[in-house]
C-alpha cells in the first residue's frame, strides 16, 4: 500500500490510488520500504538523508515474490518496495518502453538512527520512498 497524490493535492494511503497512478504512467506516490532487516543495511541506511536518489531493480529471482522490486543505493540493497505497490509497478517496469521511474528517500532516516551504538535503525518499518513515474520521451 502506498500514498499517492490525488489531483487535489491531498495524500491518501490506498493501494487503488497508487495503482491508478502507476497505470496512468504519470504521477508521484509514497510507499514503504520493506525488508530492511533482511539486507543488513540498517547502519548504511541510517546515514542517508531524505532526498537521496535510490535505484529500483527488478528482483526476478526473489523466491517469495515474483514481482519484487529491490531498492538499492550505489549497488547496496536496502530493502524492497512494499508488495502491494510492487505488483503494478513491476508490470509497468517490465513494459516496453518502460516508463521513467525515479525513487528518492522520503524519510530522513538519520532521525531514526538507533543511538545505542548498535548500528541499526530504531524505526526500520517507518522508512518511506517517494516514487515518480513519467512517460519516456
Image (spheres, grey):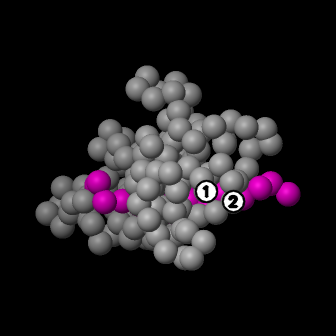
Disc number for residue 133: none
The span from disc 2 to disc 1 (Cα, nearest Å) is 6 Å
- Residue positioned 55% across, 76% down in the render: 9
129 in magenta:
yes
10 in magenta:
no
Which residues are drawn in magenta? 124-137
Q: Residues within 10 Å of mark 1 (few under 14, many from 20)?
A: many
Answer left or right for 115 relative to 99.
left
Q: Is residue 77 visible?
A: no
**Residue denoted by label 1:** 21
Q: Are marks 2 and 1 in contact (CB under 8 Å)?
A: yes
Q: How many marks?
A: 2
Task: Please tell me in which quadrant of the rendered image residue 126 appears.
Answer: bottom left
Q: Position of residue 55 (x, y in %)?
A: 58, 51
In the depicted structure, whether residue 110 falls above or below residue 16? below
- Residue positioned 32% across, 39% down in the render: 38
Nearest the viewer among 8 and 73 is: 8
In the depicted structure, whether residue 63 falls above or below residue 107? above
Q: Please tell me whether mark 1 sits on a helix, a strand or a loop.
A: helix
In the depicted structure, whether residue 115 falls above or below residue 8? above
Q: Position of residue 113 (x, y in %)?
A: 26, 65
**Residue denoted by label 2:** 26
In the depicted structure, whether residue 125 falls above or below residue 39? below
Q: Earlier in the sequence, mark 2 or mark 1?
A: 1
Outermost residue to the left: 116
Q: Please tell me whether mark 2 sits on a helix, a strand or a loop.
A: loop
Assign the C terminus to one quadrant of the image: bottom right
Nearest the viewer among 20 and 113 is: 20
- Residue positioned 25% across, 59% down in the render: 123
Answer left or right for 95 relative to 104.
right
Nearest the viewer among 64 and 47 is: 64
- Residue positioned 51% across, 42% down in the render: 86
Amino acid at each position: 500500500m502506498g500514498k499517492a497524490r490525488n489531483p487535489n493535492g491531498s495524500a491518501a494511503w490506498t493501494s487503488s490510488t497508487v495503482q491508478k497512478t502507476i497505470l496512468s504512467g504519470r504521477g508521484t506516490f509514497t510507499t514503504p520500504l520493506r525488508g530492511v532487516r533482511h539486507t543488513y543495511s540498517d547502519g548504511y541506511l541510517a546515514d542517508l538523508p531524505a532526498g537521496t536518489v535510490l535505484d529500483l531493480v527488478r528482483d526476478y529471482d526473489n523466491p517469495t515474490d515474483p514481482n519484487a522490486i529491490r531498492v538499492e543505493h550505489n549497488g547496496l540493497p536496502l530493502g524492497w518496495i512494499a508488495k502491494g505497490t510492487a505488483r503494478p509497478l513491476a508490470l509497468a517496469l517490465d513494459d516496453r518502453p518502460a516508463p521513467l521511474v525515479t525513487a528518492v528517500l522520503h524519510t530522513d532516516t538519520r532521525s531514526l538512527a538507533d543511538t545505542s551504538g548498535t548500528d541499526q535503525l530504531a524505526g526500520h518499518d517507518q522508512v518511506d520512498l517517494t516514487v515518480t513515474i513519467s512517460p519516456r520521451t
